[in-house]
Image (cartoon, rainbow, N blue to C red):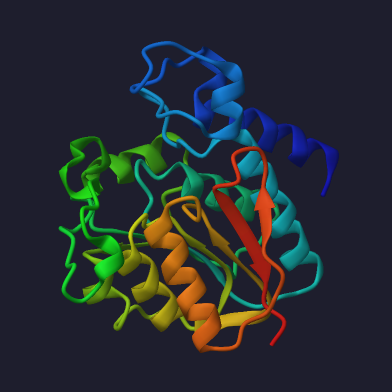
């Protein structure tokens, strides 16, 4: 990756995470650089809560799939204010990856209520009641406009994953990033989209630190005999990735 592109992406990451302007945390009321870098808080106005370390990991993964000519698009399921997808749209634009699309998948109305009869691991899950997670589609689109990456290569998919994943028209995926928190919102994505992940592509699980999300990942990998090594993204041991080998 060219040095000037690295500098641009570093500056972009600082802005997307709110580090460049000391954006305070919704859940803490102050700005803590270490927490923000690691994705340990929720920014008040910035457009992503994943922190710079996860964005740097995503940059490395992107460089890998571009260098190795891994076919496919970037898909994120669970986008909040859209920051990670904005980062990827900006990266693809800077790297002249004009054949790759960014799929922005969310209900844009928050998470679904738990269905413990079908997914016992989700019993008591609190995410349905967190209004801060319900970011309207128009607001997310406006965020893309602010960063000048709203284009035909950005595809917005609105709805709960149980409804949208069976019909999403993405053909090949190079990077699949899941940020759905719950068992249901994780297993639905893996069931429908993991088979479309290209060999040599990467699957990123943002919420493996949550027991119900981890259970969905572990169940899917066991059912399909996936043994590719899972690597944690520092520092909180909550996010991880693996490279698809077969």
Which of the 4 quarters of the picture holds residue 51? top right
Which residue is at 22% across, 60% downward? 123
Q: Is residue 75 left or right of residue 66?
A: left
Residue 177: where, in percent of width, then height?
51, 61
Between 124 and 143, the one nearer to me in the picture: 124
Residue 118: where, in percent of width, then height?
20, 76
Which residue is at 16% across, 43% downward? 129
Compared with residue 96, is residue 141 higher up or lower down, i.e. above or below?
Answer: above
Q: Quadrant of the C terminus?
A: bottom right
Which of the 4 quarters of the picture holds residue 160? bottom left
Residue 40: where, in percent of width, then height?
50, 31
Q: Is residue 221 left or right of residue 230?
A: left
Compared with residue 199, is residue 113 higher up or lower down, i.e. above or below?
Answer: above
Residue 150: where, in percent of width, then height?
41, 49
Whether residue 192 is visible to the viewer of this picture, yes or no, is: yes
Between 158 and 31, the one nearer to me in the picture: 31
Q: Is residue 242 left or right of residue 68?
A: left
Which of the 4 quarters of the picture holds residue 77? bottom left
Q: Is residue 125 left or right of residue 145?
A: left
Which residue is at 38% across, 73% downward? 187
Which residue is at 67% across, 37% downward? 9
Number of marks in picture: 0
């Amino acid at each position: 990756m060219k040095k000037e592109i690295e500098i641009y992406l570093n500056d972009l990451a600082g802005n997307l995470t709110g580090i460049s302007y000391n954006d305070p945390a919704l859940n803490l009321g102050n700005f803590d650089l270490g927490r923000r870098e690691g994705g340990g808080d929720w920014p008040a106005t910035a457009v992503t809560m994943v922190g710079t370390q996860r964005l740097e990991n995503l940059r490395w993964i992107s460089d890998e799939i571009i260098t190795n000519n891994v076919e496919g698009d970037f898909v994120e399921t669970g986008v909040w204010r859209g920051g990670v997808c904005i980062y990827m749209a900006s990266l693809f634009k800077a790297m002249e990856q004009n054949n790759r699309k960014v799929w922005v998948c969310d209900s844009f109305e928050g998470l679904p209520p738990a269905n413990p009869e079908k997914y016992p691991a989700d019993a008591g899950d609190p995410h349905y009641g967190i209004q801060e997670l319900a970011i309207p589609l128009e607001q997310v689109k406006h965020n893309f406009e602010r960063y000048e990456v709203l284009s035909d290569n950005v595809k917005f998919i609105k709805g709960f994953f149980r409804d949208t994943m069976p019909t999403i028209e993405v053909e090949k995926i190079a990077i699949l990033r899941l940020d759905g928190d719950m068992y249901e919102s994780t297993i639905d994505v893996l069931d429908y989209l993991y088979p479309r992940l290209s060999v040599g592509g990467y699957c990123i699980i943002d919420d493996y630190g949550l027991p119900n999300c981890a259970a969905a990942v572990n169940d899917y990998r066991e059912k399909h005999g996936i043994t590719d090594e899972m690597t944690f993204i520092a520092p909180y041991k909550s996010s991880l990735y693996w490279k698809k080998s077969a």
